[in-house]
Image: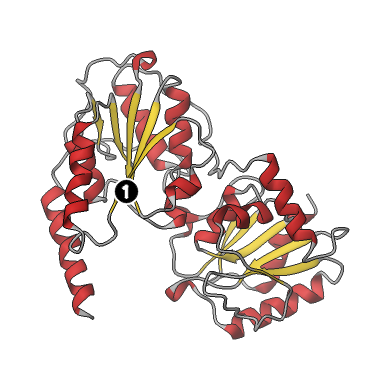
Amino acid sequence: MSNLKKVNTFRRSLMRNLTKNIGNSDVSNTETIDVTKIKKVLICRPNGRLGNMLLITPLVEEVTKTFPNCKIDLFVKGMLAPIVFENYDNIDKIIHLPKKPFKELVKYFKVWTLIKKQNYDVAINVDQNSSSGRLGVKFSNAKYKFFGNLPENVTLEHTDYDHIAKYPVYNFRYFLNQVGTKDKNEPVALIDLKLSETEIANGKEILNKIIDPNKRSIAIFTYATGEKCYSPTWWEEFYTALKKEYPNENIFEVLPVENVSQINFEAPTFYSKDVREIGSVLANVDVFVGADSGIMHLSSASKAPTVGLFSVSNLKKYEPYGNGSVGLDTNVLGVPDFIKAINKILNK
């Protein structure tokens, strides 16, 4: 392990120990909340990954519906949030935590000062395991503070509670119920990039230059980070089966920013560094197939029927949902099962 990794591991461990007891109190005695008077909300998710930004969009939708007169500030890390939330009208400020706090101490402390200066009505931490998120709520001057965790004696009975896009919404609904707002009994919103009609039309134009516009299209994404990435041999078997099963459909590959291919660029390819442009292209495909990754979540957020392939990640926590999407455990399922899932989407 490099010295930098050791420092980061120590920093995360230290932060968890320092913040583990922040906000553990029950909220049942909190004053009743008047949703019409909530004007300013802080949502804390200081994580810079594309998937994690997209996965908080259902909570943003929930907050927006609950507090229709509010503006929302996002406390995040990295520079993807302005791109993801470009078409969210009620997003106000996006507060960025530096990626490397020890190297940017001045910026790091300015973030906390900025949060402290704002007059929030409600502050919400998305992930209860996020030390910086809990601190963001703690530092805020919000009247109502939700640290992302439930009281120890509470268990919410939802079959999809484990999903990382859904349990923050269910927890938030429980919190609201404790402060006098009736609990909602409705499905959690889908993750949503909120592509405009113009963006989707532009994506169609791009796609038509790559494939035959008169045929259905299957997009594959063969890359992923670390252990989530399947080998070229694995993808070669799957890609061969796809070509055999769908000789009359377009099969093209969406390339990662690294511009690499696990099938050696054998299929037509699409490459872009523009997140919204990638999403606009995926919004026009009939099915997307790829390993658990930010691009998989981007496909789902673009409303493409998405087949997510899982080997090491927690499927229940990260699987795509909505629009016929499905997550598949490749440790117990094989190529025939993948083909069956794709057929179910294409033939519905």
Look at the picture and state if 289 lies above or below 91.
below
Question: Most extreme residue toward the front, as rendered?
Answer: 106
Give the number of marks.
Answer: 1
**Left or right of residue 182, residue 6 in this image:** left
Can residue 163 be seen?
no
**Left or right of residue 12, residue 168 in this image:** right
For label 1, the crowd category at 10 Å Cα-Cα, with few meaning under 14, some 14 to 19 and many 20 or more, is: many
- The residue depicted at 69 percent of the width and 42 percent of the height is 198
Residue 126 in the image: state x and y as whole percent. 34, 42
* Numbered disc 1: secondary structure: strand
- The residue depicted at 43 percent of the width and 37 percent of the height is 59
**In this view of the protein, which residue sits in the foreground, 20 or 174?**
20
- The residue depicted at 73 percent of the width and 76 percent of the height is 267
**Left or right of residue 166, residue 132 in this image:** left
Residue 104 in the image: state x and y as whole percent. 21, 59
Label 1 amino acid? His
- Coloring scheme of the render? secondary structure
Which residue in the protein does label 1 denote? 96
**In this view of the protein, which residue sits in the foreground, 193 or 131?**
193
**In this view of the protein, which residue sits in the foreground, 210 or 52?**
210
Question: Residue 250, located in which quarter of the rendered image?
Answer: bottom right
**Left or right of residue 230, residue 267 in this image:** right
- The residue depicted at 25 percent of the width and 38 percent of the height is 147
**In this view of the protein, which residue sits in the foreground, 332 or 167?**
167
Look at the picture and state if 288 lies above or below 236.
above
* Quadrant, the N terminus: bottom left
Can residue 172 be seen?
yes
Look at the picture and state if 334 lies above or below 219.
below
Residue 74 in the image: state x and y as whole percent. 36, 40
Residue 217 in the image: state x and y as whole percent. 77, 61
